[in-house]
Image: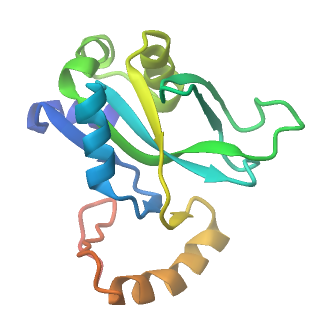
Amino acid sequence: GGALFHAWSKLDEEFLLVNGDTIFDVQLPVLLDFVAREKSPACLALRFTDDVSRFGTVEIDNRFSVLSFAEKGGFRPETVDGFINGGISYFRKSALLRYFAEFQGKPVSLENQVFPSLSREGELSGIPMGGRFLDIGIPSDYERCASYIVPWLRMGRKPALFLDRDGVIIE
């Protein structure tokens, strides 16, 4: 979250925030149509998974409002499947203004501080999305990801640019 607020002056009034350790092949027009129609100030692209053990879960109601979050290990032991945060978020900058004022220059976690607060205030939606999902947060999945990316990009569907953490273009 700190990086988001550090880049505050460069953000448009509406923007997408994408996690750097996940790849989620969502249909952005569907997400953007949803937030326009529902006038949602903030929205998460959710992915259904049949094994939530590596992830936290997100509970939504039938109007796609986010009701709650459960971090890894924080949900009932019998929970095996559910929605997870897919790492793509839509925001209206105005929805984050109070958090910018509160956390500017301080450490902050979007997942643990900002998202739950937005949810409590009824300002956070979550839309289930299909599409290929890869979380490269652990070494084995990072290695597996390499075998997916090249054929995936050869499908000719989407241009992509990969940047290292220090901004180096990876070819």
* Residue at left offset 33%, top offset 46%: 31
Q: Quadrant of residue 13?
A: top left
In the image: residue 75, left or right of residue 106? right
Quadrant containing the N terminus is top left
The percent coordinates of residue 38 (x first, y second) are 30, 27
* Residue at left offset 81%, top offset 46%: 80
Residue furthest to the right: 78
User: In this picture, is 132 found above or below 72?
Assistant: below
User: In this picture, is 140 found above or below 81?
Assistant: below
Q: Nearer the viewer, residue 100 or 29?
A: 29
In the image: residue 61, left or right of residue 30? right
In the image: residue 114, left or right of residue 39? right
* Residue at left offset 78%, top offset 31%: 75
**Whether residue 93 is visible:** yes
Quadrant containing the C terminus is bottom left
User: In this picture, is 144 found above or below 24?
Assistant: below
The percent coordinates of residue 128 (x first, y second) are 50, 45
The percent coordinates of residue 118 (x first, y second) are 42, 17
Q: Nearer the viewer, residue 13 or 67?
A: 67
